[in-house]
Image (spheres, rainbow, N blue to C red):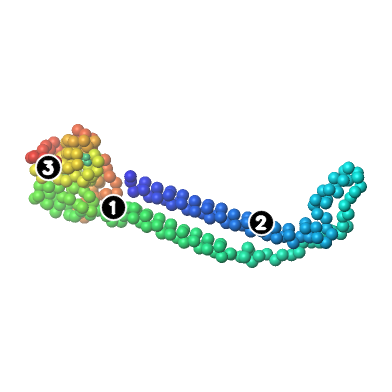
Amino acid sequence: MSSTTIIVLALVALAVLAILFFATAGAGRDRAAAINLRREARKKDKANPALTGEGGAVTGREVERNAKLERRGSGELVSVSAEAAPPAPFIPPDPDVIAVTRRQFLNRGSATLMGISLATFGAAVLAFLWPQLGTGFGAKINAGKLSEIQGTIRDTKAPFYVAEARTWLSAYPDTALSKAKAVYSGGVLDGMEQGVVALYQKCVHLGCRVPWCGSAQWFECPCHGSKYNRVGEKKGGPAPRGLDRFAVSIANGNVMIDTGKVIQGPPIGTNTTGQEQEGPHCA
Ligand code: FES
């Protein structure tokens, strides 16, 4: 799974958690407000003499009974006070209801703390997963002077390993350039024209790190035995293609490897250099 996918999944998970949290908190608040309103209404009903029947006022039941009797024409009316019911006494609002209650304060405090914790956790996850755009793998990496690298490759009869770029820099023979132009392009071909090719160390079969085999003069994967020649073209094993690679450019004599984009290796059967096995296999 790529780091971008992981970041997207982490963001989605955080968003879902945040929505769930705020929905639950909102429902709790609504419930508390409804309970307060019910209490308030009951209190007002109790204090209203028009509803309690105190002071000679008519109750709802009496009004209904009178209406029924009127319809029947019996004339047994319950006496109704001519005076209108007195207005309900003013009940000052409960300061605990209109201001922030202790419970609301605690709820809001814990919601804020939870939000801060989630945001901090999310930021830490992003910081950990985000590719380092300025330096390190994922950026353009300076592998050193081209002339020195080529000298080392010649002297050691082995590719030059650039740990920061997770890359093998291998020599590309200029005699093979005409064939290379039919297969490679862009930054890979640019590097070949300068005499180097940058091969990603990860095996294209199942991702093991592929070491160099000095005796065979090939790259040989220890996991399932895939084999690639000096320029990373597939020679054997279960690998579905040649080694993936990176674009190379030369700046002030330095080899710059662009590890921001992995370029897929050449298809099976590609053999631009014709380099064969030069000794016993390592894997
Ligand atoms: S991982 Fe390299 S051959 Fe399987």
* Relative depth, front residue between 125 and 174: 125
Numbered mark located on residue 282 in the image = 3
- Does residue 68 appear anywhere in the picture? yes
Q: Is residue 163 left or right of residue 133?
A: left
**Kind of element beneath mark 2:** helix
Q: Amino acid at mark 3?
A: Cys
Disc 1: which residue: 139
In x, y percent, where is residue 89? 76, 64
Disc 2: which residue: 38
Residue drawn at (36%, 48%) of the image = 6
Residue drawn at (46%, 61%) of the image = 113
Q: Amino acid at mark 1?
A: Ala
Q: Are marks 1 and 3 in contact (CB under 8 Å)?
A: no
* Relative depth, front residue between 263 and 31: 31
User: Which of pointers 1 and 3 lies earlier in the amino acid sequence?
Assistant: 1
Give the distance between the C-alpha atoms of the residues marked 1 and 2, in whole angstroms.
Answer: 64 Å
Q: Amino acid at mark 2?
A: Arg
In x, y percent, where is residue 182? 22, 35
User: Which of pointers 1 and 2 lies earlier in the amino acid sequence?
Assistant: 2
Give the distance between the C-alpha atoms of the residues marked 1 and 3, in whole angstroms.
Answer: 32 Å
Q: Are marks 2 and 3 in contact (CB under 8 Å)?
A: no
Q: Nearer the viewer, mark 1 or mark 3?
A: 3
Quarter of the figure with residue 217:
top left
Position of 112 relative to 153 (above/below): below
* Relative depth, front residue between 85 and 155: 85
**Kind of element beneath mark 1:** loop
